[in-house]
Structures are given as C-alpha cells and as structure tokens.
C-alpha cells in the first residue's frame, strides 16, 4: 500500500500540472523556437510517467525504512523538489519565463543531489532510482536555456 500511495501521489502531481498547463503547452509547441534535440511532444508524457513512477518507488522505499534523521531530511527534500517540479510547468509554459524556469531546474538539480545523498544513507537503491530523473533534469536544463536564448 505504501508503494501504491507514493507512486499515485507522485504521478498525481505530474498529471495535475500537465492538465492545468495543457493549453499553454499547445501554444508553446506551435510558437516557440526549440533547441536541437528537443523531443517530440508525444514522448514527454511517456518519459514523465516513467520518471514519476521511479520517483514514487524511491520515496516509498525511504518512507518504509526505519525512522531516522536522514529519512526525514530525504523525504522533506523530495517534497520540496516535487513542489518546484510542479511550479516549473507554470513558470515555463504559462508565464514563459524561460530564464526563471532554468533557475528552477538548477535548484531542482541541487535539491535532487542533496536528496539522493540522504536517500543513499537510508537505502542505496532509492538513490539510484533517481538517476534517470537527474539525467532528465540536466537535459531539461539544456532545453530550457536553449529556448531562452533562441526566443529572446
């Protein structure tokens, strides 16, 4: 039940952000110059579904671990970065503040690195499950900065 809760919670964050920004995403897709290597729009929901599932599994493993300072800090960082992840959609797609979105991504990257350092102390596999997310965040940073420079 713990795994189901964390996976569904994490997926719900992504689904909600996607639903609330869907019109802005369509406008973005048709009107913004995108950098080289920009993935097709159809790929993004698939990638994010997998990433949110991995994030949820990782958080569930940490939550199920014995209580400790590292567990508490890791879960707190998980929630903070997830909140910024949610906000990023609005900053990037709705407000089109591409540089601010890049700053959000940089903050997320730092938070995920910190989170993984705590996760690793509690359950190493939970930290490793975050690697695809970290890779995607770095790629998203490239895309976000590319959009900023190509559209200003």
Image (cartoon, rainbow, N blue to C red):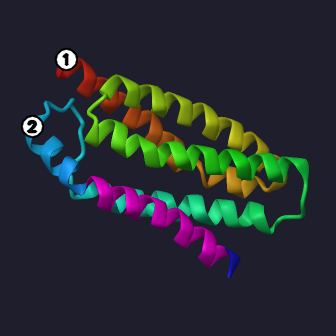
- Residue picked out by circle 2: 31
Q: Where is 9 relative to 123, above or below? A: below
Q: Nearer the viewer, residue 86 or 57?
A: 86
For the point 26% across and 23% down, the residue is 148
Q: Quadrant of the C terminus?
A: top left
Task: Please tell me in which quadrant of the rendered image residue 117 appears.
Answer: top right
Relative horizontal placement of residue 14, taking residue 126 as reference (left or right): left
Q: Position of residue 58 (x, y in %)?
A: 65, 60
Magenta region's main secondary structure? helix
Can residue 101 be seen here?
A: yes
Decide which of tag 1 and tag 2 comes sooner along the chain: 2
Relative horizontal placement of residue 61, taking residue 102 as reference (left or right): right
Task: Please tell me in which quadrant of the rendered image residue 98 appears.
Answer: top left
Q: Is residue 108 one of those drawn in magenta?
A: no
Relative horizontal placement of residue 109, taking residue 124 as reference (left or right): left
Task: Please tell me in which quadrant of the rendered image residue 65 appears.
Answer: bottom right
- Residue picked out by circle 1: 152
Q: Position of residue 42 (x, y in %)?
A: 21, 58
Q: Where is 145 relative to 136, above or below? A: above
Q: Position of residue 33 (x, y in %)?
A: 13, 30
Mark 2 surroundings: few (<14), some (14-19) or many (≥20) residues within 10 A: few
Element type at mark 1: loop
Q: Is residue 17 one of those drawn in magenta?
A: yes
Q: Quadrant of the N terminus?
A: bottom right
Q: Where is 16 relative to 121, above or below? A: below
Q: Which residues are magenta?
A: 3-21
The mark total stands at: 2
CA gap between label 1 and label 2 equals 13 Å
Query: For residue 82, which numbered disc appears in the image?
Result: none
């Amino acid at each position: 039940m713990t795994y189901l809760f964390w996976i569904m919670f994490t997926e719900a964050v992504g689904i909600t952000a996607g639903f609330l920004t869907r019109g802005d995403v369509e406008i973005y897709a048709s009107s913004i110059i995108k950098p080289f290597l920009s993935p097709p729009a159809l790929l993004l929901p698939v990638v994010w579904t997998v990433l949110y599932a991995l994030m949820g599994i990782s958080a569930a493993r940490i939550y199920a671990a014995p209580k400790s300072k590292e567990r508490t800090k890791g879960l707190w960082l998980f929630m903070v970065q997830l909140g910024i992840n949610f906000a990023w959609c609005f900053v990037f797609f709705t407000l089109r503040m591409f540089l601010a979105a890049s700053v959000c991504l940089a903050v997320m990257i730092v938070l995920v690195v910190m989170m993984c350092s705590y996760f690793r102390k509690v359950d190493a596999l939970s930290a490793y499950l975050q690697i695809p997310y970290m890779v995607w965040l770095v790629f998203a940073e490239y895309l976000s900065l590319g959009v900023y420079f190509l559209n200003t």
